[in-house]
Image (cartoon, rainbow, N blue to C red):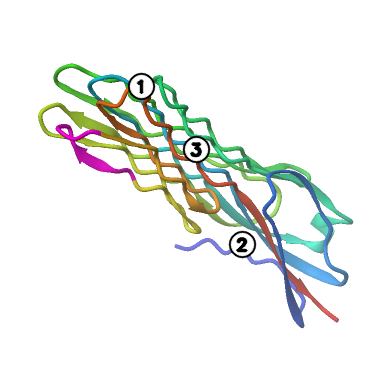
Amino acid sequence: MPTNNAINLLPFTQINIQRITAPGAFTYTPTSNLLFAKVTLVGGGGGGGGTQGGVNAACSGGGASGSLVQFILTAVQIGASLNGTVGAVGTGGAAGGVNTGTAGGNTTLSTSSMWTASGGLGGIGGATITSGNTFNAGGAAVINIVGTGLLLLNVIGQSGSFGILSLGNTANAGDGGSNMIASGGIGRAASVSSVVATPGQNATGNGGGGAGALNITFAGGSAGGNGSAGIAIFEEYITL
């Protein structure tokens, strides 16, 4: 049976949207005559792994997307203002080494208890190999922390996919994870008989994961793709 968590909300006459996209600390000040707000928080996406340079092939895992949490706060729960943080971009691992991408930052909102939309973890960097196969894991998605208010959605991000390398066949860099409002970077595939150095593709939208890098017989290696920053959205229902 569905759970009924209805709250008594007065009729509203206008909807206003506030979007906060700049990574880092922010203060949310509600519009005058607010009745309630639907809040959506998305964590930053993780970066894709970078690859080692060398005469053989290497590919890396993609970064995970940020998780999403959505909830309703009444005007009383919001008060005069609330403080929060928009999750930063997870950067791709640097070229030239087995460098894992960094995690995306958490997007938070401090009510009487903290809400957290978790950032995605970075993809594992790829080393060159001389024989056999290798699998470099994508970054993992992280669960959210639920705070005060009426929960609507609690959606874990998508993990980045593996970088898969089979000598004598193909190298496939890992895709970055996507979420409801972002697309992860797409990992490139190539024959191991080619000569290519392809950085991971960056994510688009808010909270997508960067793709892993691909490197075949190129000395410098390749950098992983960057994730994209999180976001905080306040959909305000007000009366005039």
In whole angstroms, how far apart are the C-alphas of marks 3 and 2?
34 Å
- Mark 1 and mark 2 in contact? Answer it, CB < 8 Å: no
Q: Position of residue 166 (x, y in %)?
A: 16, 29
What is the quadrant of the C terminus in the image?
Answer: bottom right
Q: Position of residue 95 (x, y in %)?
A: 43, 26
Local packing at callout 1 (Cα closer than 10 Å; few below 14, some 14-19, many 20+) is many
- Residue 216 placement, left or right of 86: left
Q: Which residue is mark 1?
A: 52
- Is 188 included in the stretch rendered in magenta? yes
Q: Which residues are magenta?
A: 187-195
Residue type, numbered disc 3: Gly
Q: Which residue is mark 3?
A: 46
Mark 1 or mark 2, which has the lower sequence index? 2
Q: Position of residue 23 (x, y in %)?
A: 68, 44
Say which of marks 1 and 2 sits in front. 1
What is the quadrant of the N terminus in the image?
Answer: bottom left
Local packing at callout 3 (Cα closer than 10 Å; few below 14, some 14-19, many 20+) is many
| Count of numbered marks | 3
> Outermost residue toward the top?
130
Give the quarter of the image for residue 25: top right
At 33% from the left and 25% from the top, the residue drawn is: 126
Residue type, numbered disc 2: Asn
In whole angstroms, how far apart are the C-alphas of marks 3 and 1?
19 Å
